[in-house]
Amino acid sequence: MNKEQNINIIKSSIIYRDFILHSGDYSNWKCNLELIKDYYKYLMNILDPKYQVIGIETEGAKLSLSMKRFGYTISETWKGPRSFMCSLVDDVVTTESTMKKTTEYLIQYGITIGEYLCVLDRRKENEKSLDIKSIVTSKDLGLL
């Protein structure tokens, strides 16, 4: 599939109404990847993680687990090996706060973040401090 087809797949997960996001911000739309869960493995293949994948609960964890050979959720990290490099994945990034908090948590277990991945990056340009690879941005979707 091409970029336009990927955009259309992700657009089909957008719900339009008033929301309060996890960040506390108000929005008239949000992404609910649960609506396109049949595409999780496909989306992870596009993101092409370089390291063992750890997914942030809830949808990031589901994306991670679609990579059956090396996916973990945050709550499972205690079961996994220590002192390894990982690809940290979430469904949507709005403010980076969840990525940063999760990074701090994983460092306690000797886990290093090799890369940050997400399906939809809806951060504002002036709020980008982490280098996060995404499939699409809110701008790609025509949503700001």
Image (cartoon, grey):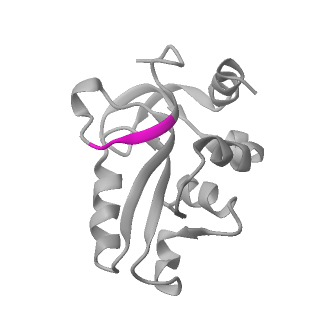
- Quarter of the C terminus within the rendering: top left
Residue lying furthest top: 142
Residue 27, quarter of picture: top left
* Residue 85 location (% of width, % of height): 43, 68
Residue 13, quarter of picture: top right
* Residue 58 location (% of width, % of height): 54, 58
**Closest to the observer: 33 or 7?**
7
> How many discs appear?
0
> Residue at the location (72% across, 50% down)?
41
Horizontal arrangement in the rendering, residue 51 relative to residue 71 (left or right)? left
Q: Magenta span covers which residues?
A: 130-134
In the rendered image, residue 9 lying in the magenta stretch gets the answer no
> Residue at the location (29% across, 60% down)?
101
**Closest to the observer: 29 or 95?**
95
- Quarter of the N terminus within the rendering: top right
Q: Main secondary structure of the magenta part?
A: strand
Q: Where is 5 relative to 42, above or below?
A: above
In the rendered image, residue 132 lying in the magenta stretch gets the answer yes
* Residue 72 location (% of width, % of height): 56, 70
Q: Where is 129 relative to 97, above or below?
A: above
Q: Where is 143 relative to 103, above or below?
A: above
> Residue at the location (42% across, 50% down)?
116
* Residue 59 location (% of width, % of height): 57, 53
Residue lying furthest front: 50
**Closest to the observer: 94 or 125?**
125
> Residue at the location (70% across, 28% down)?
9
